[in-house]
Image (tube, coloured by chain):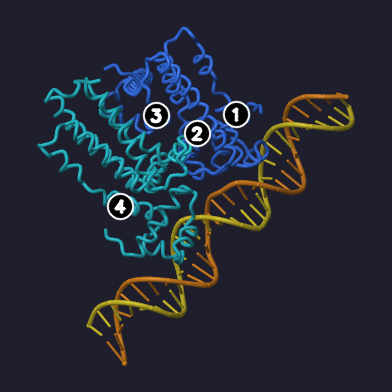
Chain colours: A blue, B cyan, C orange, D yellow
Amino acid sequence: MEFNEKQIQIIETAERLFADEGFNGTSVRDIADEANINIAMISYYFGSKEKLLEAIFELRIGNLKTRVESLIKNETLRPIEKVNMLIDEHIERVLEKPLFHKVMAGVQLTNKNPAIIKAITRLKISNAEVVGELIKDGQKKGVFKKKVDVILMLTTMIGTVNNTIMSKDYYREFNKQVDLPDETFNETFKRRLSIHIKTLFKAILTNEA
Amino acid sequence: MEFNEKQIQIIETAERLFADEGFNGTSVRDIADEANINIAMISYYFGSKEKLLEAIFELRIGNLKTRVESLIKNETLRPIEKVNMLIDEHIERVLEKPLFHKVMAGVQLTNKNPAIIKAITRLKISNAEVVGELIKDGQKKGVFKKKVDVILMLTTMIGTVNNTIMSKDYYREFNKQVDLPDETFNETFKRRLSIHIKTLFKAILTNEA
DNA sequence: AAAATAATTAAACGTTTGTTTGATTTTAAT
DNA sequence: ATTAAAATCAAACAAACGTTTAATTATTTT
């Protein structure tokens, strides 16, 4: 489905409010007020508040570039390099759209909407498969350990990055970087997070020190 | 504050519903129905729905045994052993009270209640301090690396374990262990998770392979 | 046994909720 | 310029919300 300008404006407003206040903590009036539209427009364009949530996922998950697939098939890269790029790709995704990932985190806790659950599950399975193949390849080439728990590995990657959405400001304060410009801090933080997870994955995957 | 039987019954019912449906997704009537009490009892005992949520945190966080503190001070244990026990302590905590930790995860995303934010922040700071001391000790003794990012390390531990609450069943299915008895699977899972995080931490902390 | 306190109840309170209605305005197609 | 379609609006809808009331029943204290 394609969304027009007004629809995207509503979706982005809803996304921000759902992220900050939760789905059930946000009323359609809140959304209408913040987006400067009449309340009836939400039903008019999306049918219901629930379907507006679905639209958010349609827009955001649909827009997830499948750079990953082509990355994996690249024959010139070593398996560990591919893993590292996968990590950066994931970090980039989450920090680029933190509001959406906050919504997704909230939805995963409580939401029962079949369409949304399906979309998230499909995303996870796809991730697990791609990474699984990648690891098998590394094992064949003898550079990865024989026993690797793919799910736990991804759980750590996703869990760590997700948790940073909540603890990023605390991290900044703890490391006394509140006086840095946002842009600078964000880049520093991203790099540290990237190195951190790559270190973890290296330990899981390889036999090197 | 001390809670009587009836209050605990209400708290545990609310905890379960808040975990499954979220705070704003649960009505006081839902709680009253599930707990087989009159709806007015919630205001009577707790004052409001919001304060009932606070009571959940009071009961659960208040009950968190401070085994950790005494563990840290134990002079006969090596730093890496202490770290490993800390990991198991955390896993035990979360898997023992998954409903509460699900509530806490949800609350951290959206809740603005000062009392609750305070309680969670205090818990996190306390954790960071204890682990920070432990690591300094290991560094003095020359068994830990000189540069360790404590916050990111804890983010990984908490993020990984938190994420398992949501992905545990998927993990079970993926590894074809649905036919195992719950008890058996839970123990197996707990052990794997423990080993997993210990491997990660070892890579962050030490120079060994 | 009487009095005082605590627990429980059904009913009602005023708000807020998501959604729909029907009229009106704006835009696009003929 | 006329018609058709799309967009916008204020108002209304019933249902659900958290909380309070005032009366009643149970328990405890005197």
Provide residue B98's location: percent of width, then percent of height.
38, 46
Q: Amino acid at mark 3?
A: Asp
Residue sitting nearer the eye, C24 or B63: B63
**Secondary structure beneath label 2:** helix
* Residues at marks 4 and 3, CA–CA distance in whole angstroms: 37 Å
Residue lying at 32% horizontally and 47% vertically, measured from the top left: B115
- Which chain does tag 3 point to? A
Within 10 Å of disc 3 (Cα), the crowding (few <14, some 14-19, many 20+) is some
Quickly name the residue at label 2. A16
The nearer-to-camera label among 3 and 2 is: 3
Q: Which mark is residue A149?
A: 3
Q: What amino acid does circle 1 point to?
A: Ile
Residue B156, image quadrant:
top left
Q: Give residue A39's quadrant in the image.
A: top right
Disc 4 target residue: B58
Which type of secondary structure does the marked residue at label 3 adopt?
Answer: loop
Does label 3 lie on the same chain as label 4?
Answer: no
